[in-house]
Image: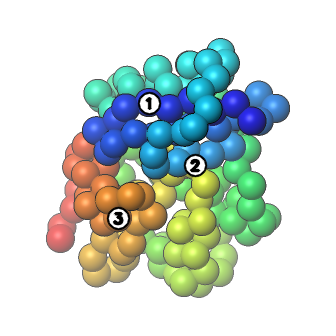
Amino acid sequence: MPQLSLHSPLGPLTLSEEDGKIISLDWGWGRDQTETPLLCDARDWLDKWFDDPKAAGAFPFPLEPFGTAYQKKVWDALCAIPVGSITTYQALAQKVGGSPRSIGQAVGRNPIPILIPCHRVVAQRGLGGYSGDGGIDDKRWLLNLEEAPLAL
């Protein structure tokens, strides 16, 4: 499986590709580095996104996260949350079905964070959790980068 790492403001990140689609984004530097056209384009897009998320637009490359049908439904809903916006676990549960807890579990299992913007989902009171290496600090940083309205 081809992987390519990049430096980011959150530390090193590694993109993985399978069958011409991005299947994961992990914190840390990957062992193997393969510069495929897709991974290079995705890396360049992320560099632009970290400079100005609103100007970068939606991630324009195919994603294929591994998960259950319910998780994929939740992840699709995450992709519909605009840059600089937030929603709650409760609101997302009302939209896609399930409970705030099941939404939180699906969000926490997102294998392609940032690109599938799980950081845009917050709790009714507080930010909730985040699976990045820096935890809630990474989530806060990403929301601040996007200039999301946080009343916390």
Q: Can residue 112 be seen from the camera position used here?
A: yes
Seen at 45% across and 46% down, the residue is: 28
Which residue lies under the disc numbered 1? Answer: 6
- At numbered mark 3, what does the secondary structure look like: helix, strand or loop? loop
Coordinates of residue 79 in the picture (x, y in percent): 56, 48
- For the C terminus, the quadrant is bottom left
Q: Which is closer to the viewer, label 1 or label 2?
A: 1
Residue lying at the far front of the rendered structure:
31
Say above or below: 55 vs 23. Answer: above
Counting residues from the N terminus, which is met first, the one under dot 1 or under dot 3? Answer: 1
Q: Which is closer to the viewer, label 1 or label 3?
A: 1
Seen at 46% across and 20% down, the residue is: 44
Along the line of sight, the residue nearer the viewer: 89 or 2: 2
Query: For the residue carrying disc 1, how many other residues have a C-alpha within 10 Å: few (<14), some (14-19), or many (20+)?
Result: some
Q: Amino acid at mark 1?
A: Leu
Coordinates of residue 106 in the picture (x, y in percent): 61, 70
Coordinates of residue 62 in the picture (x, y in percent): 69, 33
Q: Are marks 1 and 2 in contact (CB under 8 Å)?
A: no
Figure disc tally:
3
Say above or below: 142 vs 60. Answer: below
Which residue lies under the disc numbered 2? Answer: 112
- At numbered mark 1, what does the secondary structure look like: helix, strand or loop? strand
Residue lying at the far left of the rendered structure:
152
Cα gap from disc 1 to disc 3, whole angstroms:
19 Å
Q: Amino acid at mark 3?
A: Gly
Query: For the residue carrying disc 3, how many other residues have a C-alpha within 10 Å: few (<14), some (14-19), or many (20+)?
Result: few
Q: Are marks 1 and 3 in contact (CB under 8 Å)?
A: no
Q: Can residue 54 be seen from the camera position used here?
A: no
